[in-house]
């Protein structure tokens, strides 16, 4: 409660560490929430995509005559109508295929019609003649010298960020890490192991399909409503691609029905703009069906990796040599950046002084990849943790003790040679210690046999920094209302993670006021909200949070300035809290904010001040690009570390298994909203277990996806969920608001590795290939060929 204590001082309770409800709860539970697909206006046209049935083929002709005969069809658009290349960091992708298709499901045409079903019917009537080309169907195949080229003109593509493609090959980007002395590292390694792992591409499987509306106004303004994590990136991309002044591109993003990274890419918006322009600027809506969403829009990246790891007789890690081949698919998109992230954190959270890593984003004739929860880290963690578990077993050391002894700490350096301290790293040993207690690691057997049932427990550690642009930033505006309440304006998108509510808690803590007095809309409008880089990488509370604190400082200065005149004192004599401005040494004496929020009017009518509007911004500090030859540089502001465990029960008769328990301990820096934090981590764990145990796109030998629907693409079900345990360590990150660290992605990162480690122990064979289906386990034991 806010008020006065017994001595007349201002009594203010903290807003941090409280599980307050989401600001949008009422809208959601009453069903009045409006998502993009709920938007409908008179005269709205509908758009559908005609997709390629081939993974790699030249386009010879496109015949749309039959489609145009259908009543209600307004226009058919092909790639030659808009011959542009889009993409970041590498502009390698036409929104609609022009000369050839590079993946099964690639858009080859758009149909605009006055009804959704008519557009769908017409899209199926478009006839395309193809000349088939040899397809590249894995990253390792793509690396071969004689592999067919997915992009013959790679050298000509425009680069928007640091990226190192290799023309004449299928390498879209290569990131090198060269740290220490490899010869010395291997000489000191008494034990060495080498593992090869594979993780296939998969789907984001968000509840809401990707969707977008576009309309070109008579004055040239282009108005989008998009289910996106990146409204400000949409604005910039549309402006650059179609030469529209950026102030004339307006993007509205309401609540988003889940994303997990998949809606950070810019795809639908290009298509919607093209469709609107083709019909004279009329409003159009493009909504993916589930099947098209899975195969035509960007997917979760895959990885083939080889890790060689060495340690001393005592189990001290000495050297590692790593090759990452990320399956970026047909176009580089964020896959090129994810492969860089795979290099930046390639060692996992361990001190290894001698590191040689090549992390490549490979072009294949698979769907192109984009951000996915963890951004390349579930993949790199799986590879490294399988090697770590194997090496701990070789040394005959408890796997958690092995990790504890090798945990990276203050004074050590990352693979990119960034010096670590308690603030930018956190406390992995404490996470491991808490995990041991949480799962009774020392009191229960790691493997227990009961007839044909074997229970086993596996562990892992993880870390992640956010590989953001060095100038990524955000702004915030706080507007005081006459009653002393506040409207908070910012560009963070609410995709289900609770960020916009947590941001109000940060502001309430800074102004020492009731969080119920802070209002924030559920949507983002690029015309009126301050810019935010994008809602990805677990960075929103860090970037926008810092901007909000700066805006609050600005508002506090204004409040004190007005109050000082009224109270006839210096601004430095005053403090703000509990809805008032008061004397520091006499807290009971002050003036309520509602009397000065819009200026102060004296009894004689004179007025001072005006509406209090706080403005703040923040941009990343002290980040540097990576040296292209050594990888040296500072890629992120801090690392979030954690430890995880999974317990399974394997049926050795049927090779089925039950996931019994899953546990995570994360150094969160400061937990802002405990319920949000636990829910985020638990949701990530569930997603990671689903991914590891069954999720994968299945391709035929021509590169076509044969499971493009939820009847055949399996997800974990409610009744299959294990018992979850989540706990936190709090080591403040000094540059972040109240010491917080990003945790939105991190529950997922180590789950595939921990599941594989537990099943490996249970089955008695090394399980290095996802997904870990009963068939995969059986084949590894009985039919490894």
Image (cartoon, rainbow, N blue to C red):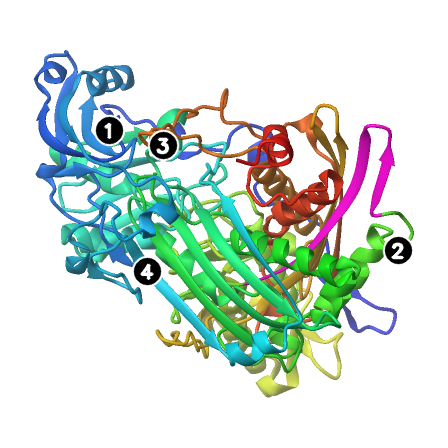
Separation of marks 2 and 1 at Cα, in angstroms: 55 Å
Residue that appears at 38% across and 58% down: 360
Looking at marks 2 and 3 on the same chain, the residue that comes earlier in the sequence is marked by 3
Q: Position of residue 497 (x, y in %)?
A: 57, 47
Q: Position of residue 431 (x, y in %)?
A: 74, 62
Label 3 sits on residue: 295
Residue that appears at 56% across and 41% down: 24
Mark 2 or 1: in front is: 2
Question: Is 158 placed above or below 732 here?
Answer: above
Which range of residues does the magenta coloring cover? Answer: 446-464
Label 1 sits on residue: 52
Label 4 sits on residue: 173
Separation of marks 4 and 3 at Cα, in angstroms: 23 Å
> Quick one: 720 or 215, which is closer to the camera?
720
> Quick one: 465 or 740, which is closer to the camera?
465
Q: Position of residue 341 (x, y in %)?
A: 46, 61
The quadrant where residue 651 appears? top right
Majority secondary structure in the magenta region = strand
Looking at marks 4 and 1 on the same chain, the residue that comes earlier in the sequence is marked by 1
| CB atoms of marks 4 and 3 within 8 Å | no
Q: Is residue 17 magenta?
A: no
> Quick one: 55 or 725, which is closer to the camera?
55
Looking at marks 1 and 3 on the same chain, the residue that comes earlier in the sequence is marked by 1
């Amino acid at each position: 409660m806010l008020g006065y204590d017994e001595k007349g001082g201002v009594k203010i309770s903290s807003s941090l560490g409280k599980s307050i409800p989401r600001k949008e709860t009422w809208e959601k539970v009453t069903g009045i929430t409006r998502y993009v697909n709920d938007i409908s206006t008179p005269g709205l046209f509908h758009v559908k995509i005609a997709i390629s049935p081939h993974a790699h083929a030249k386009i010879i002709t496109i015949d749309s005559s039959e489609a145009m005969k259908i009543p209600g069809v307004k226009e058919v658009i092909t790639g030659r109508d808009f011959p542009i290349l889009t993409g970041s960091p590498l502009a390698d992708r036409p929104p609609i295929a022009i000369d050839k298709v590079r993946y099964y499901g690639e858009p080859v045409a758009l149909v605009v019609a006055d009804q959704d079903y008519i557009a769908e019917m017409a899209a199926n009537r478009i006839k395309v003649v193809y000349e088939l080309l040899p397809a590249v169907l894995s990253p390792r195949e793509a690396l071969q010298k004689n592999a067919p080229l997915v992009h013959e003109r790679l050298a000509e593509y425009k680069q928007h960020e640091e990226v190192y493609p290799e023309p004449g090959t299928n390498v879209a980007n290569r990131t090198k890490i060269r740290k220490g002395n490899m010869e010395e590292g291997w000489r000191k390694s008494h034990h060495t192991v080498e593992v090869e792992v594979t993780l296939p591409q998969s789907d984001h499987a968000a509840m809401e399909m990707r969707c977008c509306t576009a309309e070109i106004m008579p004055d040239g303004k282009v108005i989008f409503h998009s289910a996106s994590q990146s409204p400000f990136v949409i604005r910039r991309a549309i402006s650059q691609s179609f030469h529209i002044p950026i102030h004339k591109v307006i993007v509205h993003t309401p609540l988003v029905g889940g994303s997990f990274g998949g809606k950070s890419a810019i795809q639908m918006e290009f298509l919607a703009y093209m469709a609107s322009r083709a019909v004279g600027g009329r409003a159009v809506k493009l909504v993916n069906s589930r099947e098209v969403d899975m195969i035509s829009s960007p997917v979760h990246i895959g990885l083939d990796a080889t890790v060689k790891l060495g340690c001393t007789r005592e189990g001290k890690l000495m050297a590692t040599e790593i090759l990452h081949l990320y399956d970026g698919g047909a176009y580089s998109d964020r896959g090129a950046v994810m492969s860089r992230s795979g290099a930046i954190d390639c060692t996992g959270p361990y001190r290894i002084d001698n590191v040689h890593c090549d992390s490549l984003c490979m072009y294949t004739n698979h769907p192109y990849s984009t951000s996915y929860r963890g951004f390349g880290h579930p993949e790199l963690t799986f590879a490294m943790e399988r090697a770590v578990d194997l090496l701990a077993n070789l040394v005959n050391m408890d796997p958690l003790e092995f990790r504890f002894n090798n945990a990276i700490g203050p004074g050590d350096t990352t693979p990119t040679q960034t010096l670590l301290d308690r603030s930018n790293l956190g406390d992995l040993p404490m996470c491991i210690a808490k995990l041991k207690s949480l799962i009774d690691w020392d009191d229960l057997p790691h493997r227990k046999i009961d007839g044909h049932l074997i229970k086993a427990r596996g562990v892992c550690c993880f870390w992640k920094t956010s590989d953001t642009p060095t100038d990524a930033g955000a702004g915030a505006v706080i507007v005081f209302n006459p009653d002393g309440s506040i409207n908070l304006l910012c560009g963070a998108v609410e995709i289900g993670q609770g960020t916009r509510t947590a941001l109000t808690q940060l502001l309430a803590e800074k102004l020492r006021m009731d969080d119920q007095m802070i209002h924030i809309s559920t949507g983002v409008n690029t015309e009126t909200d301050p810019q935010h880089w994008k809602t990805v990488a677990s960075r929103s509370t860090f970037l926008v949070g810092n901007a909000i604190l700066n805006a609050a400082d600005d508002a506090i200065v204004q409040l004190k300035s007005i109050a000082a005149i009224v109270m006839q004192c210096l601004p430095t004599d005053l403090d703000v809290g509990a809805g008032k401005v008061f004397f520091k040494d006499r807290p009971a004496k002050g003036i309520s904010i509602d009397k000065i929020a819009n200026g102060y009017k004296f009894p004689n009518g004179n007025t001072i001040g005006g509406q209090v509007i706080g403005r703040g911004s923040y941009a990343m500090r002290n980040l540097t690009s990576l040296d292209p030859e050594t990888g040296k540089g500072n890629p992120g502001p801090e690392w979030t570390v954690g430890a995880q465990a999974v317990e399974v029960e394997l049926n050795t008769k049927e090779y089925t298994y039950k996931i019994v328990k899953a546990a995570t301990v994360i150094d969160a820096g400061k937990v802002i909203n405990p319920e949000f934090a636990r829910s985020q981590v638990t949701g990530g764990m569930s997603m990671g277990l689903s991914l590891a145990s069954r999720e994968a796109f299945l391709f035929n030998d021509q590169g076509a996806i044969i499971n493009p629907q939820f009847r055949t693409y399996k997800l974990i079900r409610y009744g299959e969920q294990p018992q979850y345990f989540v706990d936190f360590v709090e080591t403040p990150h000094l540059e972040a608001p109240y010491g917080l660290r990003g945790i939105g992605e991190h529950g997922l990162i180590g789950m595939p590795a921990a599941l594989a480690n537990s099943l490996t122990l249970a089955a008695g064979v090394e399980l290095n290939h996802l997904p870990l289906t009963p068939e995969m386990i059986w084949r590894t034991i009985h039919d490894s060929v």
